[in-house]
Image (cartoon, helix red, strand yellow):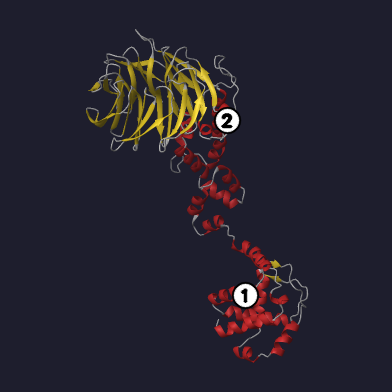
């Protein structure tokens, strides 16, 4: 549009009654009014020669009268009525023709000028009119353009509830979801990211239908649609079993020949490896509970162990660390460094940390099972160092001197001390920013490792807290009182949560001190001075089964998360 022509048109528009060009109730009315204005000066000469009298006559001809007319999608309310005949229709047509001759940029510029002269409530009408015009059913439109994969990818980000709703939108959306196998993809996403889903997939064996391309072996989308609510039901049942203490209990009698007691253990889906007070290491079949192998060589009690797919590493009261082949049971290496009992050890990614009753911490480089060299000795504790843990950033140690010390993993330099326990510390676990420790003051403390603050103190055990583990939901602790307690981690991290709501359940089955435990989403496996290993199964619980009478039914409040 030429600037002069636009100025004349706007000047004319401003000379008209506001009831004409500001009385529009929607964008359609505004555009019609605009087009009327544009149609009046059919030529530039006419614009230039139009007199004030002619403008006034035009204003009278277009004087507001209540009417309803159709533009675009239908009748528009709130418009001024006009006679069906007269010059208006002709002028409107001319206005539209003139508007159509302009470029898109000119049209947009002119409409912007016009809208800027409107009232606030008119802007609201314009917005209401534009909203449905701007909406697009892209899920239906994309397949029509041969872009089904994009529509599938968009919908694949929906959660289960939203995916259910999307299936009800129309048949085309339902087709995209079905042919895209989006319920299968949703389950696969959950299995990849959630250990509970992953464990259920393995145990219930529907993992064989996942992570495969479309073949004749893969069920249709309807199978996964019906599978999803069954998985949710299983998860709810497991969570209820944890809260209520419902479990199936299996017991391994270790039958130590001399002194009794199982000091340490670790397990996977196939086996349990335990370190005993009688100097031996026993490997158990997790399904049959039979002893598969006994490793001997230590001359003192086996106090700590850890294994991976290649080796078992053990620490003993004989002051040595031994490395065993996990398959054959052969001793591959013996490390002699500490002067007293090796109380705990951890290894990962070529690094091993051991600690001892001699008050020191040793950091080792593990190039291979047979090539292990001492990197650094950390000294600072004033009593036996009972436990260590580490990641790429920090090494964390706890001692009978009542302190937790933090060291840099890369430099082995001291960082800070966490003070708070009133007696010696027997156990801890460290992950991300959180440290959870148990002490002979009978309490459990939660710490922020970055600032050293104690976030919460958990009270409930009646004797020394000997072992502790946590995941993103729970803390599980074992103590010399023979009890295992399950705590709500998320509630414990909430300073507003009352202390009475934190302990979800107390499990009592061991007749002696609880030395070590490990757990996952489905089970706890614990060992004790009573020479037994107990498997507490929260998944495979009979429908009519009740918690054992020896597991006390205590009043508690569960905070749902």
The N terminus lies in quadrant: bottom right
Judging depth in this view, the residue of 12 and 418 nearest the camera is: 418
The C terminus lies in quadrant: top right
For label 1, the crowd category at 10 Å Cα-Cα, with few meaning under 14, some 14 to 19 and many 20 or more, is some
In the figure, 208 relative to 144: above or below? above
| Residue 215 found in image quarter | top left
Left or right side of 499 for 420: left
| Residue 427 found in image quarter | top left
For label 2, the crowd category at 10 Å Cα-Cα, with few meaning under 14, some 14 to 19 and many 20 or more, is few
| Disc 2/disc 1 C-alpha distance (Å) | 62 Å
| Residue 401 found in image quarter | top left
The residue labelled by disc 2 is 498
Residue 94 visible to an observer of this rendering: no
Left or right side of 169 for 184: left
The residue labelled by disc 1 is 114
What percent of the width, then of the height, locates residue 92?
68, 79
């Amino acid at each position: 549009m030429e600037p002069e022509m636009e100025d004349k048109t706007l000047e004319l528009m401003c000379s008209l009654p506001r009831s004409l060009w500001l009385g529009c109730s929607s964008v359609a009315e505004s555009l019609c009014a605009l087009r009327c204005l544009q149609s009046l000066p059919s030529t530039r000469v006419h614009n230039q020669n139009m007199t004030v009298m002619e403008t006034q006559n035009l204003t009278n001809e277009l004087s507001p009268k209540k009417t309803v007319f159709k533009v675009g999608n239908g009748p528009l309310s709130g418009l001024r009525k006009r006679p069906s005949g007269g010059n208006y229709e002709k002028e409107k047509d001319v206005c539209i023709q003139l508007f159509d001759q302009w470029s898109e940029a000119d049209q947009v510029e002119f409409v912007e000028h016009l809208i800027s002269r409107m009232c606030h409530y008119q802007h609201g009408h314009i917005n209401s009119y534009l909203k449905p015009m701007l909406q697009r059913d892209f899920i239906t439109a994309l397949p029509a353009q041969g872009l089904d994969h994009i529509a599938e990818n968009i919908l694949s980000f929906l959660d289960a509830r939203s995916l259910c709703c999307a299936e009800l939108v129309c048949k085309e959306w339902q087709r995209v979801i079905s042919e895209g196998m989006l319920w299968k993809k949703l389950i696969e996403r959950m299995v990849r990211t959630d250990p509970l889903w992953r464990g259920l997939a393995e145990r219930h064996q529907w993992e064989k239908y996942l992570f495969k391309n479309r073949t004749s072996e893969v069920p249709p989308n309807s199978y996964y649609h019906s599978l999803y609510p069954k998985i949710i039901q299983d998860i709810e049942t497991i969570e209820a079993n944890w809260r209520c203490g419902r479990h199936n209990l299996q017991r391994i009698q270790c039958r130590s020949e001399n002194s009794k007691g199982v000091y340490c253990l670790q397990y996977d889906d196939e086996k349990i490896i335990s370190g005993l007070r009688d100097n031996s290491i026993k490997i158990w079949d997790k399904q049959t509970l039979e002893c598969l192998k006994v490793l001997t060589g230590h001359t003192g009690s086996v106090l700590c162990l850890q294994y991976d797919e290649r080796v078992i590493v053990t620490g003993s009261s004989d002051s040595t660390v031994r490395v065993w082949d996990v398959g054959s049971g052969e001793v591959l290496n013996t490390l002699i460094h500490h002067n007293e009992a090796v109380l705990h050890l951890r290894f990962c990614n070529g690094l091993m940390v051991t600690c001892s009753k001699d008050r020191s911490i040793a950091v080792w480089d593990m190039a291979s099972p047979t090539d292990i060299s001492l990197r650094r000795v950390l000294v600072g504790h004033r009593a036996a160092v009972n436990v260590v843990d580490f990641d790429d950033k920090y090494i964390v140690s706890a001692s009978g001197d009542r302190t937790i010390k933090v060291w840099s993993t890369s430099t082995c330099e001291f960082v800070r001390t966490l003070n708070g326990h009133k007696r010696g510390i027997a156990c801890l676990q460290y992950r991300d920013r959180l440290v959870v420790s148990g002490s002979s003051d009978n309490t459990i403390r939660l710490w922020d490792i970055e600032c050293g603050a104690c976030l919460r103190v958990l009270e409930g055990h009646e004797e020394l807290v000997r072992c502790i583990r946590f995941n993103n939901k729970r803390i599980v602790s074992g103590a010399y009182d023979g009890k295992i307690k399950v705590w709500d981690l998320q509630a414990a991290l909430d300073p507003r949560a009352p202390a009475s709501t934190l302990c979800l359940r107390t499990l009592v089955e061991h007749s002696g001190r609880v030395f070590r435990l490990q757990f996952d989403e489905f089970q706890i496996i614990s060992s004790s001075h009573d020479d037994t290993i107990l498997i507490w199964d929260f998944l495979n619980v009979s429908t009519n089964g009740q918690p054992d009478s020896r597991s006390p039914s205590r009043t508690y409040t569960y905070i749902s998360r």
